[in-house]
Image (spheres, rainbow, N blue to C red):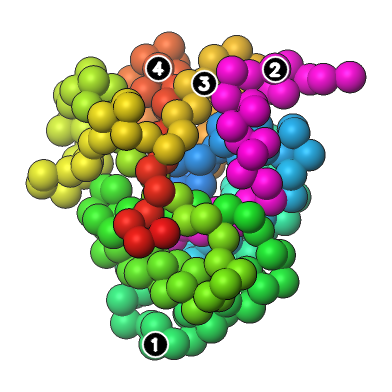
């Protein structure tokens, strides 16, 4: 028996991705950028692993960072549960400090995870980190290097991206909440996407539940935008094949 998620228009394409590992910098990156895709993949029976580099603890006074990191780690577990994803790895690198990590250490950890899970597809940020955040950019470099080191066994590597019409419709949000570095996000024409997941119905509901679970990061934004506009804002997930892959 199929589920409502399996009947999604992108279901066949997502099923074709096989087992998936997604790799991000902070708790909530995964739900914003690939929550719908992960939920859909899990519903089609794929093994889905989510790797997060940091606990996202930096946005608190120094004495409160450990507590925030614990909270965001718990939020991540709840969010992934809402998406039907049970397997996740927290690397434990410092929030805001990924660029200072010895890349050989980070890349080796990712290679080990990929060799263990043996995914058909890996998904992460593009080289610009999508928003431009230095941690995002660094994670993108680590992932590219890790996938390359797998040589003949290398999985397909996809980067998240945006599309112009969607970004333009929410330019006021991006400006008001200072979401992107100047010149970003990078956008891609629809016809040049490797995969477009347009979320609605149960799939969008699952993504919204996941993001609501990241309450330390999302509650105020949801309230400021209003839930219906927030739903529209999170309703597209776009991916391109990484250059050279």
In the rendered image, residue 155, in percent from the top left (x then y), is placed at 57, 60
Residue interval drawn in magenta: 1-25
Q: Is residue 93 above or below residue 81?
A: below
Q: Residue at x 72, y 39 (%)?
A: 42
Tell whether 161 sits left or right of 63: left
Among the two numbered marks 1 and 4 on one chain, the one whose residue lies closer to the N terminus? 1
Per the image, the residue denoted by label 3 is: 199
- Give me the C-alpha separation between circle 1 and circle 4: 39 Å
Circle number at residue 102: 1
Circle 1 residues within 10 Å: few <14, some 14–19, many ≥20: few
| Looking at the image, residue 244 lies above or below residue 182 | below
Q: Which mark is residue 232?
A: 4
- CB atoms of marks 2 and 1 within 8 Å: no
Between the residue at mark 2 and the residue at mark 1, the CA separation in whole angstroms equals 44 Å
Residue positioned 67% across, 36% down in the render: 15
- Say whether marks 1 and 4 touch (CB < 8 Å): no
> Is 211 situated left or right of 165 in this image?
right
Q: Quote the CA–CA distance across marks 2 and 4.
A: 20 Å
Provide residue 166's location: percent of width, then percent of height.
Answer: 28, 22
Tell me if label 1 and label 3 are in contact, CB under 8 Å: no
Q: Residues within 10 Å of mark 3 (few under 14, many from 20)?
A: many
């Amino acid at each position: 028996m199929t589920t409502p998620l399996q009947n999604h228009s992108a279901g066949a394409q997502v099923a074709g991705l096989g087992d998936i590992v997604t790799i991000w910098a902070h708790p909530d990156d995964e739900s914003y950028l690939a929550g719908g895709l992960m939920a859909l993949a899990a519903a089609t029976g794929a093994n889905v692993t989510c790797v997060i580099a940091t606990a996202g603890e930096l946005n608190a006074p120094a004495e409160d960072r450990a507590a925030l990191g614990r909270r965001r780690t718990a939020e991540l577990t709840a969010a992934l549960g809402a998406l039907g994803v049970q397997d996740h790895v927290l690397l434990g690198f410092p929030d805001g400090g990924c660029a200072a990590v010895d890349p050989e250490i980070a890349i080796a950890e990712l290679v080990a995870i990929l060799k263990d899970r043996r995914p058909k597809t890996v998904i992460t940020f593009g080289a610009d980190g999508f928003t431009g955040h230095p941690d995002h950019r660094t994670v993108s470099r680590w992932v590219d290097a890790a996938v390359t080191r797998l040589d003949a066994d290398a999985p397909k590597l996809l980067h998240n991206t945006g599309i112009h019409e969607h970004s333009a419709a929410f330019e006021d949000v991006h400006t008001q909440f200072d979401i992107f570095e100047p010149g970003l996000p990078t956008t891609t024409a629809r016809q040049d996407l490797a995969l477009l997941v347009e979320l609605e119905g149960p799939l969008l509901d699952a993504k919204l539940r996941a993001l609501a679970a990241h309450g330390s990061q999302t509650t105020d934004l949801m309230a400021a935008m209003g839930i219906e506009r927030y739903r529209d804002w999170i309703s597209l997930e776009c991916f391109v094949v990484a250059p050279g892959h």
